[in-house]
Image: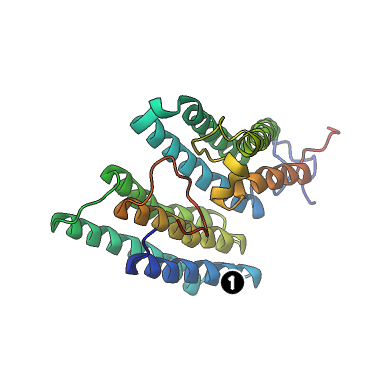
Amino acid sequence: MTIDGWFIASIVVGMASTIICFVAAVMKKKPNDLTLISLAVVEIFIIVYAVASLIRVLAGANINGEPWEFWGYILTAALLPVGGFYWAMTERTFWSNYVMGAVGVTVVVMMARMAQIWYGVSTAAQPLQLGIGS
Amino acid sequence: MKNNSTTAAPSSPAGRTTGAGRLLITVYGIFAISATARAGYQIATHFTDAPVAYLLSAFAAVVYIAATVSLAKPGQKWAIAAAVAICIELVGVLVVGSLSLFDQQAFPHATVWSMFGRGYGFIPLLLPIIGLWWLYRHRERANR
């Protein structure tokens, strides 16, 4: 798959959030400013990516895969931090940080799939191959 | 365990839907969403390519949704429902995983459970084992 700047940025932002949240959880801390901000940064990143993708498409860029699949992924990814935040806050223990940490890494996986759709490397029958560049 | 039988409410043993259980529900929820989206996409776009594989994807999605909901609900009946759903999930990942390994002609098209969920970091294989262990740890007391 093609690795572009967006995907690299998502790895930095998503994994940073996951690591921050997991470290806080291991330290038995409840969600604090740091972990909540890291989750918010993930959400902001997705929104920026969505807006930038929209601008790129309007400027004439072509999504090689199914456009509605791409936008479906963006919408789902944008809802993940919101859902994670809600689920983490309804019972606020150190486990909430693990819940929030699960969001970042999931977004990275989804960004990998979005990159596949955008650059058109994959077919739908191809499994999402984590760690195996194809 | 400070939950005594004096509380008349038919509550589940403390903890099944709290603490680490919420993380388990989170992971199941993520798989429910992704499996549903994937099956929906496969069936909507090229169902005729591999109807069996894609119906299997849809079945997996239903199992994940059932497991997520029943894990999140308190009470013994939901615990049993969760155990049933997770057992089906475990059988599914073992059968489909084995078939995709030994009889690749049978499953040329990928599902969540193909190759024991290798495409998803083997989480589909680990998740039911962890889920059943969690339910066992938080099972309802037999005496009542």
Q: Nearer the viewer, residue A84 or B108?
A: B108
Locate residue B95 relative to residue A96 in the image: left or right. right
Q: Residue at x 36, y 31 (%)?
A: B46
Locate residue B134 relative to residue B54 in the image: left or right. right
Asked whether residue B23 is in view, the answer is yes
Q: Position of residue A67 (x, y in %)?
A: 26, 45
Locate residue A126 relative to residue B115 in the image: left or right. left
What colour scheme governs how the chains and residues are painted in the rendered image of this protein? rainbow
**Helix, strand or loop at mark 1:** helix
Q: Nearer the viewer, residue A22 or B7?
A: A22
User: Pointer 1: what residue?
Assistant: A24
Task: Determine the residue located farthest toward the left in the rendered image.
Answer: A59
Image height of B102 relative to A118, above or below:
above
Q: Position of residue A28 (x, y in %)?
A: 65, 69
Q: Position of residue A72 (x, y in %)?
A: 33, 45
Chain label for disc 1: A
Image height of B16 relative to A41, above or below:
above
Q: Residue at x 60, y 43 (%)?
A: B115
Q: Amino acid at mark 1?
A: Ala
* Category of crowding for the residue at label 1, using alpha-carbon neighbours closer than 10 angstroms: few (below 14), some (14–19), many (at least 20): many
Q: Nearer the viewer, residue B104 or A66?
A: B104
Asked whether residue B74 is in view, the answer is no
Q: Position of residue B23 (x, y in %)?
A: 60, 53
Q: Quadrant of the C terminus of chain B?
A: top right
Q: How many marks?
A: 1
